[in-house]
Image (spheres, grey):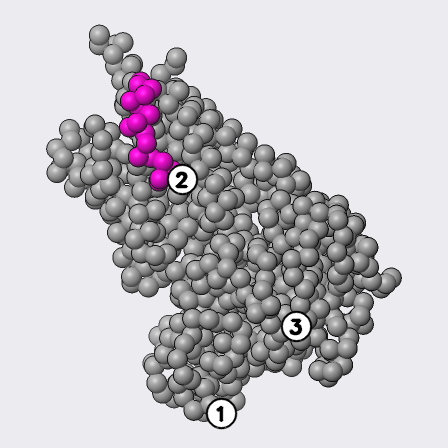
Amino acid sequence: MKRLPLLLLGAAALFAVAPHALAFCGFYVARADTKIFNQASKVVLVRDGDRTVLTMANDFKGDPKEFAVVIPVPTVLQRGQIHVAEPALLDHLDAYSAPRLVEYYDENPCQIMERRMAPQSVAGGVVGGSESGAHDRSLGVKVEAAYTVGEYDIVILSATQSDGLETWLRESGYRIPQGASRALGSYIKQDMKFFVAKVNLKEQSKLGFSYLRPIQVAYESPKFMLPIRLGMVNAAGPQELFIFALTRKGRVETTNYRTVRLASDAEVPLFVKDDFSNFYRDLFAQQVKKEDQRALFLEYAWDMGWCDPCAADPLSLQELRQLGVFWLEGPVGRPGGRMQPRPDIQPQPQNVFITRLHVRYDAEHFPEDLVFQETGDRQNFQGRYILRHPWKGDDRCEAAQTYRRELPKRMEREAQTLASLTGWDIQKIRGRMNLKASGPPAEDDEPWWKAIWKD
Amino acid sequence: MRHPIFDPRLYQILVLASLLVYGVVRLDLEVRPLLAAAMLATALLTQYACTRIWKLPAFDPKSALISGLSLCLLLRTDASALGVALGVVAAVITIAGKFVIRWRGKHLFNPTNFGIVALMLATDGRVWVSPGQWGSAALFGFLVACLGGLVVNRATRSDVTYAFLASYLGVVFGRALWLGQPWTIPFHQLASGAFLIFTFFMISDPKTTPDSRAGRLLFALLVALGAGYVHFVLYRPNGLILALFFLSPIVPLIDRLLPGRRYAWQPLPILERRFA
């Protein structure tokens, strides 16, 4: 019988462990000796067919004249393909799709019902920008185009060799981080162009913005990807990236990394309400750890016509168009153009599906650029955490007594859920919940058999 | 040449079934148990029905089970009723395809490959393949099991798997070398469950590959180049299964140019020796 050892091999091998090989858009380049970090970025990818509108925003906090961004793009861009957006657009999108907290109030168990209360969301505001210079040299570098758009000076470069491009950038006053040449070379060979932007200080002061606005580019290319390799060259530690994909058909996922749903729908202790930002931050860190830093997290997948519960109102038609949703046509449907959620009416699908992905990446775990695909999945998903306020009445019906008996167990469960989601110390959690600090609550005071023949 | 002592398909069924169970229980592979069960049952029923219609001597569930399990591992649909229906339709197409689309007594397409690609093209993306959803543990274990399969299958047609592996590794590593990418990139590109299923369970299907060894080597090379073209020139996903789908129709041509002996699953040579 040769079958047995093979059976064992098949079963054992499936639980063995092995390494899995693997790597925002552009890197910031100092023109002076400033330490540059490229930590949290937001990208909106509007995609249908081969058409893409990419909006990029970074949380750049330095002196505007110090910074530049270099982004590989698939095609040479015309002036009309580049636009500068208002950061409020991204903030709204962020707030709409952010993980949310919902509150329920336990009803009198003697007259059972449940009511849903207002949600609360965590949303961060992030502004992005970039800077760079342009001269023509015979280094195999060709300035394909140069534009000033909003507060940015933009050049589109094509190059034939990476050292030429690197020299050109250095001579133009950009500090190229060590190791960029190799990554640049690989994009050159793939016939990518380079979008180099820096802040035009005169334009910026004329426009009167104190922050850097997101840059938008529109192009047509089969490449549905985000180049993240350059961004990791000068990164200090892992970087945070939020990708908001707006598509027509359905959810977007990566084809070359795992896309994992964020732990959701968990009941957590009431005090999380006052500490939701920390909760979300630590929960995310814990999830990253659990997936061995090798996954992207799905935080929201929803038809953009509605939400339930809404962390923020759905985006208006006008806002969606500004983000580049080019397939939305026709006049704005309702006064003011805002798609308000209407709990009394069946939600209308809007033909725009949002996928919010969150990734923390570094060169070790993400060696390759992110490649995406649109799937046919229109199932809704949200990062949602639940607070349940205990009922405090003093009715003495049978159900109320059972309810009171079960309550400490529930609270202990919430404490344990919170600890496992965030990695917080269970004793501290119990302390904050005013639970007895010593492990799970005592078993029922009544003997077990009392519940059997109650009458 | 050694002849197989038992049907190598039993080992394949075991490996795929273990992987499916692990995928359902431990991984977020988005394989819904009910859908998987429905697809497997449909595959077997279709096989049975086709066996009766085409009046085959006996109902053999093994190949249908392998096709069904591969389908469960690769094909994704949404959780709606339509999604479930599409999964069931895929199982029917997969099995019925091999009875209907034949050329000189040999089915043309690998059944699972045909089921997935035909439905993907026909429904404009309502069904899809998620190549990136495999954890590294599952991948490594699966790789070991696949390599084990090569040992088990040594008397059958593993040459096409070796030839495909060599050609596709050549394409992926050659590209990385040309682009000056670090080696972690091609390794990462190969760390895909879809790639492993393809290499060890699809292209290796002895019933649909060319009859002669030279023909199989040529076919494997063409599929590897085709997949590389889809991935790295057209920048589209699903390069492997698309390449196999579109290249399968040239197998009869290869068989004509490079003829060989038709493959049969049953370990016939042993019977021949004993009863001859």
Where is residue A23 shown, x and y percent of the image? 64, 51
Identify the chain of the residue marked 3, using the numbered disc in the image.
A
Q: Are marks 1 and 3 on the same chain?
A: yes
Q: Amino acid at mark 1?
A: Asp
Q: Which portion, as a residue range, is magenta?
A: B243-260
What whole-number distance in Å separates the C-alpha atoms at marks 1 and 3? 66 Å
Q: Closer to the camera, A55 or A9? A: A55
Q: In the image, is A394 to the left or to the right of B254?
A: right
Q: What percent of the width, then of the height, locates residue B16?
A: 40, 39
The numbered disc on residue B243 is: 2
Say which amino acid is labelled 2: Ala
Residue identifier under label 1? A394
Mark 3 or 2, closer to the camera? 3
Query: Contact (CB < 8 A) between labels 3 and 2?
Result: no
Foreground tag (2 vs 1): 2
Q: CA distance from mark 3 to mark 2?
A: 43 Å
Q: Mark 3 falls on what kind of element?
A: strand
Q: Please determine whether, in this image, residue A250 is positioned above or below residue B233.
A: below
Between the residue at mark 2 and the residue at mark 1, the CA separation in whole angstroms equals: 70 Å
Circle 1 residues within 10 Å: few <14, some 14–19, many ≥20: few
Q: Nearer the viewer, residue A310 or B26?
A: A310
Q: Which mark is residue A149?
A: 3
Q: What is the three-letter code of the residue carrying label 3? A: Val
Image mark 2: chain: B
Q: What is the number of the mark on residue B61?
A: none
